């Protein structure tokens, strides 16, 4: 007569089943969709097997081949797939926060570089006279739609500089259209 396995307190099978369900649903996959992906990946499964894995009343165990294939399909390690869903959310938030910190640092460095380039450009145009300021104003005016959503002050600052210098307010395109209307080539 086979011995009865004593109740275990580790909970890895429970964590795995809940995590499989969480990962499947987070990707918008149906039970049949996961089963089809498993089969296509070389580990044939049908939807009822996935259902029994996820159902806490039935709780079918996952074998090693299924575990490795699911981890591959979910693009994570086996260890991550065995992590309880609650800890997975915490881990994901931490990972996303670190990504945001990295990108925010890059953004700050790039803003500083862009600010320095802006200062260099304005200083050069200012030292070079009205023609250079007019060219700078024209470039920003022609590209205003690209700059204004990101930093409205760029265009406003240039308008202030050009108004102080009493520069023409037409863009290059507007001047070209006016020249053509007047028959100038």
Image (cartoon, helix red, strand yellow):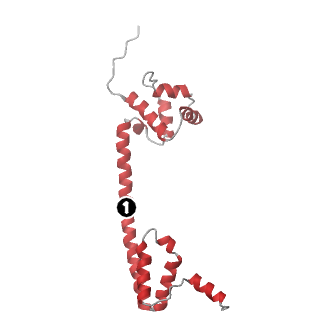
Quarter of the rendering containing residue 15: top left
User: Can residue 62 be seen by looking at this rendering?
Assistant: no
Residue 132 point in image, percent of width and height: 48, 88
User: Can residue 40 be seen by looking at this rendering?
Assistant: yes
Name the image quarter holding the C terminus: bottom right
Q: Residue at x 39, y 70 (%)?
A: 111
Quarter of the rendering containing residue 151: bottom left
Q: Which residue ends up furthest to the left in the rendered image?
A: 9
- Other-residue count near label 1 (Cα within 10 Å), few / some / many at <14 / 14–19 / ≥20: few
Residue 81 point in image, percent of width and height: 42, 37
Q: Residue at x 44, y 92 (%)?
A: 129
Determine which residue is flagged by label 1.
104
Q: Residue at x 59, y 36 (%)?
A: 40
Q: Nearer the viewer, residue 166 or 8?
A: 166
Q: Which residue ends up furthest to the top in the rendered image?
A: 1
Name the image quarter holding the N terminus: top left
Relative vertical location of residue 11 with respect to residue 129 in this rendering, above or below: above
Residue 20 point in image, percent of width and height: 45, 34
Q: Nearer the viewer, residue 65 or 162?
A: 162
Q: How many marks?
A: 1
As helix, strand or loop, the secondary structure at mark 1 comes to: helix
Q: Residue at x 46, y 87 (%)?
A: 133
Residue 27 point in image, percent of width and height: 50, 41
Quarter of the rendering containing residue 12: top left
Relative vertical location of residue 39 with respect to residue 180 in this rendering, above or below: above
């Amino acid at each position: 007569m086979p011995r009865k396995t004593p109740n275990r307190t580790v909970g890895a099978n429970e964590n795995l089943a809940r995590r499989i369900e969480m990962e499947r649903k987070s990707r918008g996959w149906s039970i049949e969709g996961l089963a089809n992906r498993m089969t296509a990946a070389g580990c044939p499964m049908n939807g009822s097997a996935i259902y029994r894995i996820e159902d806490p009343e039935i709780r079918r165990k996952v074998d090693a081949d299924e575990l490795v294939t699911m981890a591959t399909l979910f693009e994570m390690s086996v260890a991550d797939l065995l992590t309880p869903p609650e800890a997975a959310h915490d881990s994901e938030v931490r990972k996303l926060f670190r990504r945001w910190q990295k990108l925010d640092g890059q953004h700050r460095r790039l803003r500083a570089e862009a600010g320095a380039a802006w200062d260099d450009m304005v200083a050069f145009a200012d030292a070079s006279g009205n023609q250079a300021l007019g060219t700078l104003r024209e470039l920003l005016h022609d590209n205003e739609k690209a700059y204004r959503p990101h930093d409205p002050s760029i265009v406003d600052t240039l308008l202030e500089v050009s108004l102080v210098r009493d520069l023409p307010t037409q863009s290059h395109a507007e001047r070209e259209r006016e020249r053509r209307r007047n028959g100038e080539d």
